[in-house]
Image (cartoon, rainbow, N blue to C red):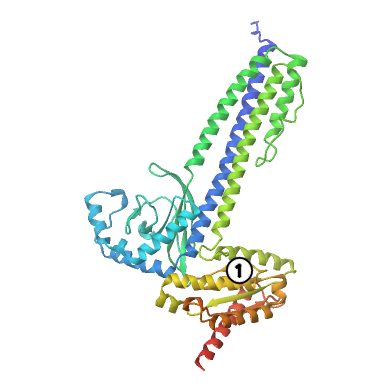
Amino acid sequence: MAKKRFISLRTKMLTCLILICFLMGSLSVFSVNRIASSIVDIEYKNKAEQLSEAVANMIDPDDVIELRDAVLKVYDNVDEVIPSTEWGSDAWNEYMAHYEGIDRLPVFNRLREQLRVYQDIFKVSCIYIMDYKTEVKHAIYLVDAAYEEACPPGVVDSFDDGIWPDKDNPIVPATLTNEEIYGWLYTAAYPIMKDGEVITHMCVDVSVNEIKEKERNYFLMTVLTMVALTVGMTFFSSRYFDISVIRPVKELSDTAKNYCSEANNMEHHAFENLKRNSNDEIGQLLSSMKQMEADMNSNIKEVIDAKVALKASQELASKDALTGVRNKTAYDYEVKRLEAEMETGDCEFGLAMVDLNFLKKINDTYGHEKGNISIKCLCSLVCEIFEHSPVFRVGGDEFVVVLRNGDYKNADRLIRKFNDRLEQIESDNILQPWEKISAAIGYHKYNKNVDRNVEVVFKKADDAMYKRKALMKAERKE
C-alpha cells in the first residue's frame, strides 16, 4: 500500500488561509470597482441624455430649419457623398468645397454661439447638431460648437453599427464609445421638434476619460494592496494555529463572507467594528483590513461626491439660460409630480398661461437682444406677482405658473394685479419700447371631477389665455 504524502496542518492552514484571503480580496476589489463604475456610468449616461434634451428644447427650431435646409440643399445635389473616413483626401476636399460659405451665414454663427454658451455652462466636451439619414446610414453635421477641430457643416459620418433614430423612436440613447482621438465619450442625441415634427437632432458628447483613468488607477492600487496584504497575512498567521490563529482567521473569514452582502452604495465598517486587541500578526492583519476598508470607503465617498456634483449639473440643465426660471424639461418633471398627486385624490393646484405680445415686432424692429429684454421683463413681472408659485418658461415667449397655496386661493386678485401692472408699464413714458411689455394671461383650476390629467388643465388655461389675447386685440382696434 502506497504511503500517503504527509501534509502538515501548518501547510493546510496556510493553503486555506491563502484561498480565503484571495477570495475575500477579489470579491471586495471587483465588487467595489464594479459598483463605482456602474454608478458613474449611469450618472454620466443620464447627464448626456438630459442635456441633449434640455438644449434641444432651448434652441430656436426656426434657426435650425434654416441652417438644415441650406446644408441639405447642397447634400441633395452633389453627385457623390464623401464620408469623413476620407477626411483630408482630394475627393473629400472637393466634396466639402460645395458647402463653402455656409459657415459664414448669420444663422450658422448664431446657432454656434448659442451652443457654445450651453457647452460652457454644462461643461461638456461638445454640443453639435446633426441630421440623420437612416436609410443610407449618413449623419450630416449642421453646426459643431467645438472650439478646436470642429466639424464644418456638411461633414458626413457613415457607419453601419451603432444606434440610429427611427420614426417610432427618434431619441438616440446615450452610448459609450472609446475612440483613439476622443477617448471615452458618452454620446446622446435628442430630436429638435417643431409642431410635433422632428426637424433634426441635438447631440451631446460627455467625456469620461478622467473618471475611467481614476477607475483604472484605483483598481490597480486595490489589487496591489490585496496581494501585499495576502502575503503579509499568510507569513504572520502561519506561526499560530489553535486559539491564536484559527479563531481570529475564522472571524476575519466570516466578516469577509458577509462583507459584500451589505448595501454596496454606502460605506462599510465591518472590519472597523471588530474588537481584537492582540498585539501580534493577527492584530496587524486586522489593521490592514481596516485600512483597506477605509480606502474603499474613501473611494465610495468620491463616487457619492461625483453623484452629488452630477445632480447639481442636472439641476442646472433644468434652468432656463435666458431668464433663470425653470425650463420646459423642469415643467415636464413637474407635470409627472402633479399627476402622481392627482392619483392620491388630494391635489389642489391651478395653471396660469402667460404669453408675451408683439415679440416678433420687437425682434424685427429693434433686434433679438431687445426681444430677449422683453422676455426677461415679463418673466420678472410674473415672478413678482406669483411669488409663491413655481414659474416655467415653456416656449420662446410663453410661461406657465403652477398656482399653489396662497396664489391658488387668490388667483383672481393676482391676475387683476398682473393686468393692472401691465397697464402701468404701458403708460410709463420713461421706459423704452421693448420694456413696455404687453401680455395675455389665462388660468384654470384643477377640478378632480372633470379634469382627467394635467394636460386638460393646461389646455383650458391656454384657451383662457387666448380668449384674453383676442379681447385685448379687439380693444386695441376700438
Residue 73 position, x and y percent, is: 30, 67
Q: Quadrant of residue 107?
A: bottom left
Residue wearing tag 1: 391
Location of the N terminus by quadrant is top right
| Residue sticking out furthest to the front | 430
Q: Is residue 253 above or below residue 122?
A: above
Query: Disc count in the image?
Result: 1
Amino acid bearing label 1: Val
Whether residue 269 is situated above or below residue 191 in the rendered picture = above
Seen at 50% across and 92% down, the residue is 477
Q: Quadrant of residue 402?
A: bottom right
Q: Quadrant of residue 35?
A: top right
* Horizontal and vertical percent position of residue 376: 52, 70
The secondary element bearing badge 1 is classed as strand
Residue at left 59%, top 66%? 331
Q: x%, y% of residue 467?
A: 57, 85
Relative to residue 11, is residue 156 depicted above or below? below
Front in this rendered view, residue 254 or 333: 333
